[in-house]
Image (spheres, rainbow, N blue to C red):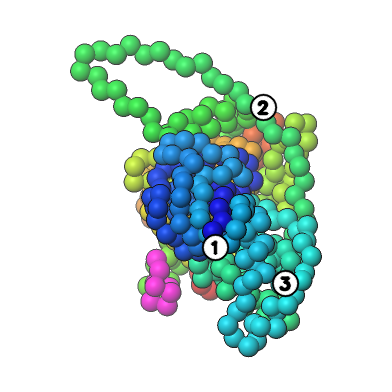
Amino acid sequence: MAEYKLLLPSMGEGVMEATIITWLFNEGDNVKEDDSVVEIATDKVDSDVPTPVSGKIVKILKQKDEVAKVGEPIAILEIEGEGTASEEEVSSETTTAAAPDTETLKTIEEPLKTAATSTTEFSGDLYLSPLVKSIAQQENISEAELKSIKGSGLEGRITKEDILGYVANRGNQPAPQAAPAPTAVTPQPAVSAPAATVPVSAGDEIIPMDRMRKIIAENMVKAKQIAPHVTSFIETDVTNVVKWRNKNKAIFEKREGEKLTFMPIFVKAVVKAIQDFPMINVSVSGENIIKKKNINIGMATALPDGNLIVPVIKNADQLSLSGLAKAINDLAYRARNKKLRPEDTQGATYTISNVGSFGNLMGTPIIPQPQVAILAIGAIVKKPAVLETKDGDVIAIRNLMFMSHSYDHRVVDGSLGGMMLKHVHDYLENWDLNTEI
C-alpha cells in the first residue's frame, strides 16, 4: 500500500488559505474518488474538498478551525501501490491508468498514456480536481473549452467521465477562442482601522462576531479608506418594466419552472450602460487603470444569518434575459443554502444591490474593492407623476423607483458616474413591452 497526501487545492485567484470547518470522514474511514471529505471556509465562501483518489484516511493533518495554505497537505490516505505519493504524482498516474469502458473512448487511452505533460495553466474561475486538470493539460484543452463542458459531478464539477467524453467527441465540438492570460497587477495596500473600545453596561449582551461578519467588517472599512465615494441619485419610471414582468412571469414560470424577478431586467440595463461607458468597468492598481474585458456582475445577497455575500454572474453581457434569470435564481438559491463555490464569488467588475427588496427607497452602497462603482436599486412604489402628452401635461399613477450610484472619485468623475446612471434610467424607462423572454 502507498501513502497519498491530500493537498488543499487552489480555490481561485487571491485565495491563498482556508480554515477547516469540519471533516466529513474520520481517520480509518474509506473514501471513494470525488467524495467530499472536508468542508473549508475561505475569506470568500464556504466550500468542500473532494478527494481525487480512492483509499483510506489514515491521518488527518489539519484539525477543525486550523488554517491550511493552498498546496499544503491536510490528510494522508492509504491507496493501492507502493511508496509515498503527492496529489500531483497520483493524479498523473491515475490519469494514465484510467480508460473509459466504451469502444469509442478506448481510442483516447493511448494518447493519455503517452502524452507529455503540458504547461497549460487555468485561472481560479474553474475548480478542477488534479485528475481532471492532468487530463486537460495532456490533451491541451483550453480553459475556454473547459468552461463549455457541462459537469455532472458535485455542484456541476467536471468529472473524469465528463472530460474523457469531451475528448472523444472533441472533433465535433466548435473550437472556442482561448482566453488571454491574466495580467499581473499590484495589490492594494491593506489599511487597518483602530479598534474602538465601548463600555459595557449591566444587562448589555456581548455577541462575538462570526468569521463572515469579521471579514465583511474588514472589507467595508478598507473599501471606504481606499476609495473616495461619491453618490448620484435618479428617480426612474419603471411602469413598462412592471407591465412587462406581469405579462411574462406566469409564462416564464410555466416554461422554465423558475420565478421571473426584476433583477434580470436591472442587470440587462446595467450591462447595456456599461457597454456604453466601459470606463466604469475598471479597477485601480497603483497608478494604473485596469480596463476589464469581461462584464461580471456582482449581486449583493442577504443570507438567513444576517450576513452578506456577493455571488457573481460571469459574462453577463453574453446571457439572454432567460439566461440571466436562471443564473440569478441559481446563485441566490445556492448563496442562501451555503452551496456556493469559491469561484462563484470572484471576479466581479460591477455590483448591484437591491435595497428595495427590504422596502428601502434608496441607499448609499459601499463599493466592493477592487471595483469602482456599485448601483443600489430602491423599492418600486406607485406615485402620482406628471406625464407630458401631445395634448398637454397630465397627472397619472406610475411605478417609480430611486436608483443610487456610488463611484470611486479617483477614476470616475461626476460626469461619467452620472451619465452611466442616466443610461440605466433610460433603458428601464423605455423598456420595450414586446421584449422576448
Question: Residue placed farthest to the left in the image?
Answer: 203
Question: In this picture, which residue range is highlighted in magenta?
Answer: 252-259
Disc 1 packing (10 Å; few <14; some 14–19; many ≥20): few
402 horizontally vs 9: left or right: left
* Amino acid, disc 2: Pro
- The residue at which mark 1 appears reads as 80
Q: Nearer the viewer, residue 45 or 18?
A: 18
Mark 3 and mark 2 lie on one chain; the one further toward the N terminus is 3
Residue at 62% from the left image edge and 72% from the top image edge: 98
Dot 2 surroundings within 10 Å: few (below 14), some, or many (20 or more)? Answer: few
Lower sequence index among marks 2 and 1: 1
Residue labelled with disc 3: 113
**Is 427 inside the magenta-drawn segment?**
no
Q: Amino acid at mark 1?
A: Glu
Q: Looking at the image, is 141 positioned above or below residue 45? A: below
Mark toward the viewer: 3 or 2: 3
Task: Give the residue at x 69% y 40%.
Answer: 283
Taking depth in this image into account, of 406 and 208 the one nearest to the observer is 208
Prevalent SS, magenta region: helix
Splitting the image into 4 quarters, where does residue 149 fall?
Answer: bottom right
